Image (cartoon, rainbow, N blue to C red):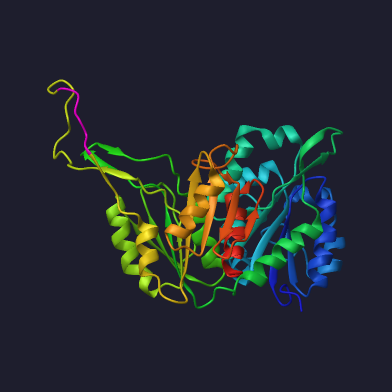
Amino acid sequence: MSALSGKHIILGICGGIAAYKSVTLLRLLIKAGAEVQVVMTPAGKEFITPVTLSSLSQKPVVSEFFTANTGEWHSHVDLGLWADCMVIAPATASTIGKMAHGIADNMLVTTYLSAKSQVFVAPAMDLDMMAHPSTTANINLLRSYGNIIIEPESGELASGLVGKGRMEEPEKIAETLERYFSATVDMKGKKVLVTAGPTHEKIDPVRFIGNYSSGKMGYALAEECASRGAEVTLVSGPVSLSVHNPAVKLVRVESAREMLAACEEAFPSSDVAVMCAAVADYAPRTVADHKIKREHSDVPVIELVKNPDIAATLGKMKRSGQLLVGFALETDNEADNAREKLKRKNLDMIVLNSMRDKGAGFGTDTNKVTVFKADGSREEFGLKPKSEVATDIVDAIMSI
C-alpha cells in the first residue's frame, strides 16, 4: 500500500506554463490513494481549467475566498487544519515572493500561511528569473521557514532557452511525497540529541574566538529527525536560526564547555546523538572582565587551552544500543582523517565535508558529504540543499 493512501493533500497550482504537469501529478496522487484538494491562483486558471482538475480530484477547485453567486465562504483555516501536507507545483516567482513575505492576496497564499503541516514547493520559471537574486533570496527564506524545496531541473524552457527552471517531473514529486510519508514514523519513539552551530570562546566581554559555522546543517538534521517521529534535543551554539517542529527542544549555549554540559545531560537518555556542531578547538585560558582597550595596553598575548572533545567524551560514555555520529570538516587527507576520528572517538558513523568542495562547508545552503560507518562501508552523496543532505544522513543512520 502506498504511504500516500488516505493522506489529505493540498495541491497548489500557480499561473505558469508548467501547470499542465500538475494534471499528471494530481492523477498520480489520486491513484496512490490520496485525497487531494486543488487550490489555484487566479492566473493558474488561465493555463489549466478547474473543470479538468475537479473531474480528477472529485472536489470543487478552490480559487477565490468565496463563491460569487452563492456567497459560500472557503475557509483557508479549515484547509490548513485538514491537510497532511501541501505541495505547490508549479510555484512561480510571484507566488514564491508572496509566500516568503506573507502577502496574502489570494486563496493559495492565505492557505499556505494557515498550513499546519509540511509544505513542499516546486519552483518553475525561466532561467533568468530563477537565477535572479530576489528569487534566490525568497527561496532561501522559504527553506529557512521549514518548507521543503523540490529543486527544478535544467533543460529546455518554454522560452526556448536552456537552463535551470523546469519544474521537477510529476513522478519525482510524487516520489518525494511518498518518501516523506513513508519516513515520518521510522524514528517514532526514539530520542535524538543533535548539536549545531559554532561555539564562541570569550576573550573579553565583546570579543571571542569562533568560526564561520551557520548551524544550518545541524538544524536541518534536527528538523528531519523530528519529522520522522523522534523527540529531539537540539543543543545549539550562537546562530540566528529558529526551529519549526514542536518536537524539537532547543537548548542554546555559547561555549564548548556549556555545550558539553548540555550534551552530558541529554546523552544518557538518547538513542542517537549527532555531533554536527563546529566546536572551537581552543579557548582563552583567562577571560578579561572588561573590554581590552587598544589605547591603554600593549598587544595582548592570549594563551589558549584545549577545549573538551565533546564527541570523544560521549564516545566513552556510550552504552550498548546507542548510536553516536560525528562530523569531520577537513582540508586535506580527508578520508584518512575521517576514518581516524571514527575509530578514535568510538563513533558508529562519521560525516565528512571537504572545504575543497565548492558549495559545501560553512555558511552555504548546500552541502556535499561522504558517510563512513564503523563497519568499513562508505557512501558518497552529491551536492544538495542541506535539507536533502539531512535526509541522506538520517537514512544512513537508520540503516546501521
Left or right side of 185 for 240: left
Does the magenta run of residues contain 299?
yes
Residue situated in front as seen by the camera: 371 or 377: 377
Residue situated in front as seen by the camera: 93 or 261: 261
In the rendered image, the quadrant that contains the N terminus is bottom right
What residue is at 31 percent from the left and 52 percent from the top? Answer: 256
Q: Is residue 39 above or below residue 306?
A: below
Residue furthest to the top: 295
Q: Position of residue 314 (x, y in %)?
A: 37, 64
Q: Is residue 388 above or below residue 10?
A: above
What residue is at 53 percent from the left and 42 percent from the top? Answer: 333
Q: Position of residue 98 (x, y in %)?
A: 61, 45
Q: Is residue 350 above or below residue 31?
A: above
Q: Position of residue 359 (x, y in %)?
A: 59, 39
| Count of marks overlaid on the render | 0
Residue situated in front as seen by the camera: 284 or 63: 284
Left or right side of 323 for 393: right
- Magenta stretch in the rendered image: 298-303
In the rendered image, the quadrant that contains the C terminus is bottom right
On the image, which quarter does residue 92 sit in?
top right
What residue is at 83 percent from the left and 72 percent from the top? Answer: 31
Does the magenta run of residues contain 94?
no
